[in-house]
Image (cartoon, rainbow, N blue to C red):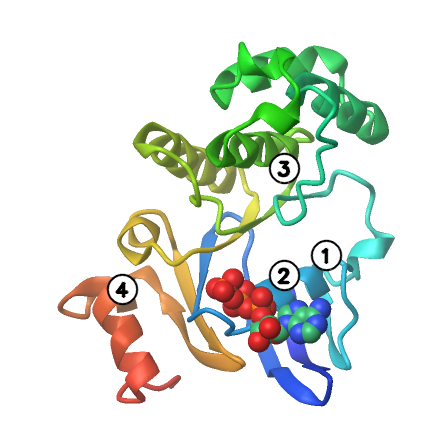
Amino acid sequence: MAFERVSKAYGGRPVLEDVSFTARAGQVTGFVGRNGAGKTTALRILLGLAAPDSGHATVGGRPIAELAPGTVGASLEPGAHPARTGEGHLLVQAAALGVPQARVRPLLGEVGLASAGRKKVKGYSFGMRQRLALAAALLPEPGVLVLDEPTNGLDPDGIRWLRDQLRSAAAHGATVLVSSHLLGELEQVVDEVVVLDRTVLWSGDRAATLDVDGGLEQLYQDVIAGSRRIS
Ligand SMILES: Nc1ncnc2c1ncn2[C@@H]1O[C@H](COP(=O)(O)OP(=O)(O)OP(=O)(O)O)[C@@H](O)[C@H]1O
């Protein structure tokens, strides 16, 4: 997956400027940056939900619109209808993606919604909605996973489960791009890190982050303070 010189402005205000980086297959790439740094905008562009003013974001060298449905799993816009049950939501998604319906119940169990799956989404807590969004992203067993702050609302068990999912997806060759503000958590799961603030301020591998005393948290502070720059 690659961003090549992607720029985007809203109302004349630049939100992304010349953003270039690659997230590789078989790796988890962490995408970090302050509130408003442009992470979600970049992910939306990758997913074809927003158009860049210039540059390209591609998966396997192609824009997402050209890929078969289910190639990319994303948790950006959950969009579950409130009157539908969690199970109903996943069944509709499965039908649209050509995924066997039989995958839905076990997946609900995996994300901890085995009994809640039969209840309407409007009664879900924030964390339950997040779990459902993650289930929807994982449903087609995609080769590419794009998750925007997936730990938001998750309890400690959910966070541990997510960590295992991300590692397992990467171990099976998936390209995983995950944004998060939980740097201590992210540090445990990533192979690569990209720090964004309108443009890419820093990118490097896990070894480079662990090399820094204080790990990713300190590296992030250094990058934001300008004392560590992309080499
Ligand atoms: N559709 C839009 N119209 C106008 N401005 C937008 C739109 N989408 C995002 N922005 C602005 O673009 C900037 C970047 O927002 P974005 O959501 O991409 O940041 P982020 O890094 O994901 O932030 P956070 O960590 O808070 O989720 C913000 O200033 C936001 O207000």
Location of residue 100 by image quarter: top right
Q: Which residue lies furthest to the left in this view?
A: 213
Q: Residue at x 74, y 32 (%)?
A: 81
Query: What's the mark number on residue 216?
Result: 4
Closest to the observer, 173 or 151? 151
Using the numbered discs, state the Cα–Cα distance from disc 4 to disc 3 in whole angstroms. 26 Å
Q: Where is residue 116 in the image (x, y as percent from the top left)?
A: 55, 15
- Residue denoted by label 1: 47
Which residue corresponds to the image point at 43% horizontal and 70% vertical from the top-left? 33
According to the image, label 3 marks what residue? 137
Q: Do the residues labelled 4 and 3 touch (CB within 8 Å)?
A: no
Is ligand 1 closer than 8 angstroms to the Cβ of mark 1?
no
Q: Distance between the residues labelled 1 and 4?
A: 27 Å
Residue 195 position in % (x across, y down): 42, 72
Of callouts 1 and 4, which one flags the residue occurring earlier in the amino acid sequence?
Answer: 1
Marks 3 and 1, the one that precedes in the sequence: 1
Residue 3 seen by the camera:
no
| Image quadrant where residue 227 sits | bottom left
State how many labels appear. Answer: 4
